[in-house]
Image (cartoon, helix red, strand yellow):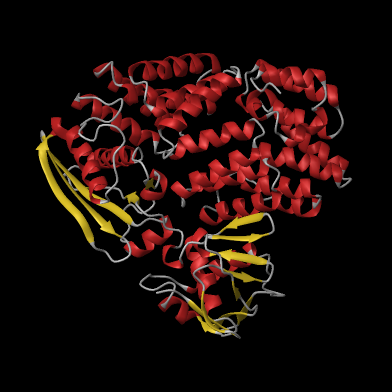
Amino acid sequence: MIPMIESNSGTQTLASGFSLGPWRVEPGRNAIFQGEEERHLENRLMQTLVYLAQHAGQVIPREQFFSSVWQGLVVNEEALSRAISLLRTALDDSAQAPKFIQTIPGVGYRLIAEPSVVQDSRSTPLSAVGIQKNSIAVLPFVNLSSDPDNEYFSDGITEEILNMLAHVKRFKVVGRTSSFAFKNKNEDLREIGNTLGVTHVLEGSVRTAGARVRITAQLIKTNDGYHVWSETFERQLDDIFAVQDEIAFSVTKALKVELLGDASGHQVIGGTHNTEAYQAYLRGLHYRNRGALKKTVYNAAKAFQLAIDLDPDYARAYAYLAFTWNDLVWNGYESQKEGLEQMNAAAQKAIELAPDLAVGHLALGLSLQCDFVDRRNIEKAINTAMELNAGNVFVQIEYGRLKCNLGQGEASVAAARKALDLDPVSVYTNHFLGHTLYFARQYEAAIRAFRQTLELDPHYPKPHYFIAMSYYWLGDDESALKEIRKEPLDWMRWTASTVILHRLGRAKEAQDNFDSLAEIGISENNFIQQAGIHAQLGKIEQAIDSLDIAYSYRDPGLTQVAINQFFDPLQDEPRFIELTEKVGLKR
C-alpha cells in the first residue's frame, strides 16, 4: 500500500518523498537531506517517520505504532522511545523544545511540523523502502548433528555459501556479522527483511553422521514468507563442495540472476577437494570469528595451517592464514618482523594458487600496508580485490580504509556506507562509518555514527574518544571533556584529555594525563599519541622525534599519519613530509 498524507490540497502520496521543515525526506533511499548534507536512517526509523507524516498533527498512541509500523513484532515501549530519540537526533530536534516530534506524556507522539509532498521522479517508491531487489541474507544453518561441537561445520557451511553468493552479479548479500546476529533467535521474517534490507533469506540445517551429510536449504521471501525454493541434499561428506555450489546456483537461478563465470562449476575459487582440509579450514573460520583473545587467534592460525598441510594448494586457507597473522601482529602477540614475513608469504601463495581470489589480494594489501610499502602497490592489491568481489564487506572496508589514509574522504565514506549497507547491524561497520566521517572531518555526522555504534553496543571501545575529539575540533571543549571521561581505553582517554584540559587552561591536570600516557610509552608503544599531543601544544621537534621512534617500532598506526588531525601543525615540516614518504604516503 502506498502511504498517504492529508494536506490542504487534498490526499497525496509520499512515494516521491516529502519535505519537513528544512529537511527533504527520501524514503526510497532511507535518507534525509538538508542542502548538501545527507543523513541515512535505519529502515525502521524511516518507516516510523513516514508513519508520523501520514498522520501529521494527530496524536498517535504507542499501541498504534505497535499495530502498524511494528506489526507482528515483539517490542516494548523502550524500543519505540529509542526509535523516536534517534529520529530526533537525526532531525536536530529536541524533546524539551520540539520542532518536529512532540511527546504526549502517557499517550504517544505526534508530528507537529506539516510535511509537504515533493514530486521527484528519481525517488524510489515507498514499497521498496531500503530494500534492494535481488537481495539476500544467509541465516546461520542449524546444526542438527548429535554432537554440538559440530556447530563449527554448520556455521562454516553457511559462511561459504554466503561468500559464493557474494560473487554473483546484481546481488546484495548481507555480511556475516549481520546474518549471524539472528542466530538462535526466532525472529519474524518481515523484521529480518526490514532490519537487513533484503527481499529474501536463505535458511537451512546441517546434519552429519559418519561420512554422510544432509543439508536442507530453503529460500524464503521476507515480505510474505513465501517459499521460493527448497531442497534437501543427502550426500557423502566428500561431496560437500558440490552441494555448496549447487545450493548457491539454485538460489541464483530461483532469483533469475546470472552467475559470474561458469555457472556449471562445482568449486569455490581457491577451494579444496580434500574433506579433512576443508574441515580444518572451517575450524579456522570458527576460531577467527570468536574474537581476538590470544588463545583463540592462535587456534585459528593452527587450524588454517593444518588445512594447508593437508592440501598445500588450498588458496583460501593461505589467505585466511595471512589474515590471522595480521591479527597476531596488531594484537601484539607476535613481533612485527615475524608476523609480516608470515603474512606476506601466505598472501603471495594464495594469489599464486588462485589469481582471481579476492581475499588473497586483500591479504596482500594489508601486508604491504603494514610493511610501509609504496602506496601504488597497496592500491593495486586492494583495487584488484574490489574488482574481483566488491560484494565482500571486508573488501569494502579495507578499500575505504585505504582511501581514508590517503586523504580521499569522499571515496572512503562511500565505501564505508556500502559496507554498512552490506552488514547493517554489525557494530564494526557502524564504527567504521564513524571512523571515515571523522577523518573526512565531517564531525557532526561522525558523532551521529558513533552514537549509533554505542546504541548497538554501549560497551564498545573507541566511540567515546572519537565523539570527544569531534567536539574538540568543533571547539566545544566542555562537551569533549564530558564525553572523554566515558572512554574505557586508558591510552585514548589520556591522549584526548591532555589536549582538551590544556585548551581549557587546566595545565596541571593535562600534564598528569600526559605523564600517565608516557609512563607506559615503551610497553604500549603509544609514541604516535605522544607525538600528536606535542604537535597540538606547538612542540614541533618533540612531535617529530616521537614519530621517528614510532617508525623504529614499525607502528602500523603510522598509516594514518597524513590524515590525523593532531598532526595538522606539522604538514609543512620537511622531516614530517619525509616520514609520510617512508610510510608509503607520498604527497
Q: In this view, does 316 lie above or below 219?
A: above
Q: Residue furthest front?
A: 121
Left-right relation of 222 to 552: left
The quarter of the rendered structure image containing the N terminus is bottom left
The C terminus: image quadrant: top right
Q: Is residue 303 above or below residue 86?
A: above
Query: In this rendering, is residue 507 above or below 70?
Result: above
Q: Where is residue 5 in the image (x, y as percent from the top left)?
A: 53, 80
Residue in front for this viewpoint, 456 or 20: 20
Percent x, y of residue 472: 77, 47
Q: Which of 256 and 442 is in front in this view?
A: 256
| Res 361 quadrant in image | top left
Q: Say whether residue 118 is left or right of residue 422.
A: right
In the rendered image, residue 167, in percent from the top left (x then y), is placed at 35, 37
Q: Residue at x 49, y 44 (%)?
A: 419
The percent coordinates of residue 46 (x first, y second) are 52, 65
Q: In which quarter of the image is residue 147?
A: top left
Residue 515 visible in rendering: no
